[in-house]
Amino acid sequence: MNFLGHAVVAQHGSDAFLLGNLIADGVKGALPTSGWPSDVIDGMRCHREIDAWIDHHPAVMALKPRVPPATRRVAGIGLDMIWDHFLARDMLDPSLQVPELQPALMDRVYDTLTEHEALIPPAMKPMFEALVRERWLESYARYTTTCHAIGRIGLRLRGENRLQQLTPWLIREQALLEATYHELWPDLLRRATAVKGG
């Protein structure tokens, strides 16, 4: 999942724990054991555990064979953002009363990234500055906007833009992806409630 999903999981912890969940993809290799506040390291560990859990969830495993073969290697990136779309949509729907999905979490993400800028890996800083400045999390609530953003991410990868090639399938299979989300996220929200890091 992408930033919003990891924020949902991390929201019961400290801001440093939340930050670790947000920046974990920018810290390559083995999990650090020093050089960071312990709550940040715990957040990175949580992020990696949740990524592995999502990748092996039965609903996601059932979906993978339906992804166009040429795009399967990068499909996880696109799916992560699609899950964030459904989360953002539900967070911003005033008719829903899901305690774990409150729009104030988006502001907390922006505030945490701003207040702890010094701890953000340098390669991630331009992206997070844009995320805060342009309030990307709210924009995820628009499905077509999310799909176009997925295609743009593909420009940063080497070789053909497989994510751009994936986007027509994402648009065509919106109903299938939403059905998968409805299987996946109740399990994740239960798991998120149990995570009390930091």
Image (cartoon, grey):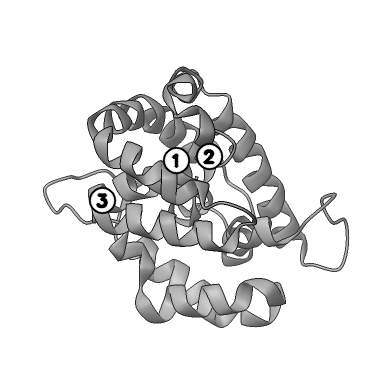
| 39 lies left or right of 189 | right
Residue at the location (47% across, 48% down)? 163
What residue would you read off at disc 3? 143
The span from disc 2 to disc 1 (Cα, nearest Å) is 5 Å
Residue 166 appears in which quarter of the rendering?
top left
| Label 1 Cα crowd, 10 Å radius (few <14 / some 14-19 / many 20+) | many
When the figure is inspected, residue 81 is found, relative to residue 79, above or below; the finding is: below
Looking at this rendering, what residue extends furthest in the left direction? 95
Residue at the location (88% across, 62% down)? 34
The answer to whether the residues at label 2 and label 1 have Cβ atoms under 8 Å apart is yes
For numbered disc 2, what is the local secondary structure?
helix
Earlier sequence position, callout 1 versus callout 3: 1
For numbered disc 3, what is the local secondary structure?
helix
What residue would you read off at disc 2? 76
Q: Nearer the viewer, residue 70 or 116?
A: 70
For numbered disc 1, what is the local secondary structure?
helix
Q: Nearer the viewer, residue 132 or 186?
A: 132
| 72 lies left or right of 20 | left
Three-letter amino acid code at the position of disc 1? Leu
Residue at the location (30% across, 55% down)? 102
Image disc number at residue 194 = none
Q: Which image quarter holds the C terminus? A: bottom right
User: Residue 125, image x and y in percent?
Assistant: 61, 77
User: Residue 157, image x and y in percent?
Assistant: 61, 57
Looking at this rendering, what residue extends furthest in the front direction? 160
User: Residue 135, image x and y in percent?
Assistant: 35, 73
Q: Nearer the viewer, residue 129 or 92?
A: 129
Three-letter amino acid code at the position of disc 2? Gly
User: Residue 25, image x and y in percent?
Assistant: 66, 56
